[in-house]
Amino acid sequence: MKKGIEEIAKDDGRYDAAGLKFVFDGLGHTIQKIRQQEQAETSGEEPVPRHISGQELAEGLAELAVERWGRLARLVLNLWGISTTRDLGEIVWLMIRHEWMSAQPDDRIEDFDNLFDFEQRFEKEFDFTPKSLR
């Protein structure tokens, strides 16, 4: 029987269960965003499902964090033990090991190394313009 997110987080001990849930939810968010972009690029045709790369997932998670918590995104993630893109990868691989996510044979945890700096992305580059005005 597959372990629940709470149990996985408790057994692993590095990250809060809320962080694992955020990464899992962020995968769905990222897939939906990419499908919408691809559908727009192909004149409304339904895109063919494809694998999401580590970089695409990290970018989708950053976008979702800003949508949910705005300028507090880095603080929230840090409270859960997530302070680098490598941490996102560690959670992804933890979820893969427990069959909550899947990987392709050429996927590696290093795909998440140094993709962006949390301080730069969530604080220095933060856009205070309301989304409706962008």
Image (spheres, grey):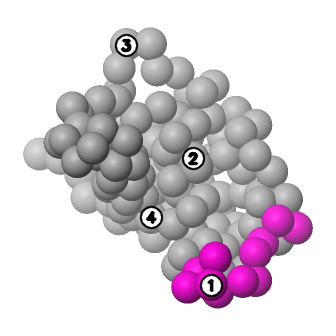
The image shows residue 113 at horizontal and vertical percentages of 70, 33
The relative height of residue 96 versus residue 37 in the rendered view (above or below) is above
In screen coordinates, is 117 left or right of 18? Answer: right
| Cα–Cα span, label 3 and label 2 | 19 Å
Magenta: predominant secondary structure element?
Answer: loop
Query: The disc labelled 4 sits on which kind of residue?
Result: Phe
In this view, the mark in front (4 or 2): 2
Residue at 46% x, 70% y is 18
The relative height of residue 49 versus residue 8 in the rendered view (above or below) is above
Query: The disc labelled 2 sits on which kind of residue?
Result: Ala
**Element class at badge 4:** helix
Q: Which residue is mark 2?
A: 58
Q: Which residue is mark 1?
A: 133
- One can see residue 7 in this view: no
The relative height of residue 22 versus residue 41 in the rendered view (above or below) is below
**Upstream in the sequence, badge 4 or badge 3?**
4
